[in-house]
Amino acid sequence: MNKHKGRLITGGCLLVAMLIAVCLRPSSTAANSTPVAARLTTQDTQSVTLSAQQARRVRVAQVVTRDFTPEVDAVGYVDFNQDGLAQVTSPYAGRVRQVFARAGDTVKKDQVLFSVDSPDLAQAEAALVSAAAARVQTASVLRRANGMAQVQANAPRDVEQAVSDQQTAEGNYQAARRALHIFGKDDAEIDRIVATRRIDGELRIKSPIDGQVSTRTIAAGDLVQPGGSPAPFSVSDANSVWLVANVTEDDAPQVHIGDALTATFPALPQQTIKATVDYVGNSSDASTHRVTLRAVLHAPPAGLRAQMLATYHIATEAPSKHASVPMNAVVREGSGAMVVFTTTDGRRFTRCPVQLGPAQDDYYPVLSGLGRAQSVATEGALFLSNALALKSQ
């Protein structure tokens, strides 16, 4: 009896020991499941899979190769072509008698713009009339002296004096004519003054060029002075304008004469103009620390006016080819990283960090991080970024 009892106790102890050993032994299933779960989590943090309904909200585009041109961007304005801009002033003081043109009028060279009652001109005309009369008188005296000398009715010195007086009168007359030429009178007008002996002192100011009246600052009755500011009239060459840009000191060394320039205008959103840089300033503005450059635009389009604001893009190098993605395919993350989402089937999208260059024509050049034979999400890229962020939490 005791022997059987001892066997039962021994068997029970063995059974308990086996149960304890089984409980303490690590489960192979549990040991293997942890690394598998970890591998799945690491793999899925960079991708997200959409349902068919979600996938319909996302648009996909193929990565394509495009030409991108290194550019310098600048702001500026449109200006008159200063090489063809004439500031028309009166060379002598006086009161405006008449005005013959208005701002916006198209004028021809030598067309009269306004007239001035000039005391200086009246004095010059009076001097001409007096010189013309003296010229006639001395010529008559010389003829009479020569006639009397032929019959020996006067002394030789009388003839000599008459010749001297006539030459002096002729010189004064020619000087008076030249003075009126300086006032802008032509030979026909001068001859008319001599013939009629009429002095009116009206100084007619003419346009020196063909063009368009850009400003007019006078009216009849105004007093004008030589060199006064602003000028009574300014006439601009309507066939060309300046495109003026102000670039930063950092960008200025990249711009050279001959670079292609593209201009857009807030006032003319549908208008894009191309020109060529023909001037780069050799100094920087002390206040703005910007360098001025400009291009001449010939035959400007209708509606383009001086002092309009403009945005400029100056191509500083030859174009180069890069893989490109639409701007709406790029998501800027909170860390500042730029990412796109690539896909092969339109359902599973993988996060792909990329390095981008400056955007042109609504596309970014991809400098690194993306191949040229891939597809990326465009519309819905931000949705994918948010979905991936929620999945990672």
Image (tube, helix red, strand yellow):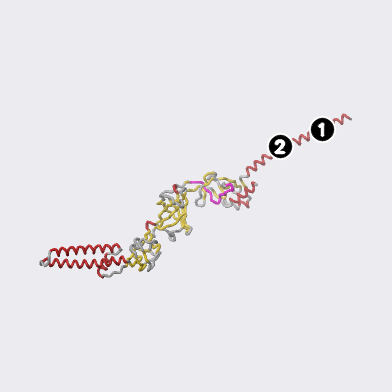
Nearest the viewer among 168 and 254 is 168
* Placement of 29 over or under 126, stated as above or below: above
> Where is residue 300 shown, x and y percent of the image?
41, 58
Whether residue 161 appears in this view of the structure is yes
Residue 348 magenta: no
Q: Identify the element where label 2 is drawn.
A: helix
Q: Farthest residue to the top: give it.
A: 3
Q: Amino acid at mark 1?
A: Cys
* Placement of 131 over or under 291, stated as above or below: below
Nearest the viewer among 359 and 185 is 185
Residue at the (65%, 41%) spot, across then down? 39
> Where is residue 143 shown, x and y percent of the image?
16, 67
Is disc 2 surrounded by few (<14), some (14 to 19) or many (20+) residues within 10 Å?
Answer: few
Residue 331 magenta: yes
Nearest the viewer among 313 and 142 is 142
N-terminal of the two: label 2 or label 1? 1
Q: Amino acid at mark 2?
A: Ser
Do labels 2 and 1 touch, CB within 8 Å? no
Magenta segment, which residues?
321-335
Q: Identify the element where label 1 is drawn.
A: helix
Question: Which numbered circle lies on residue 28?
Answer: 2
Question: Which numbered circle lies on residue 193?
Answer: none
> Where is residue 83 shown, x and y percent of the image?
37, 56
**Residue of label 1:** 13
Is disc 1 surrounded by few (<14), some (14 to 19) or many (20+) residues within 10 Å?
Answer: few
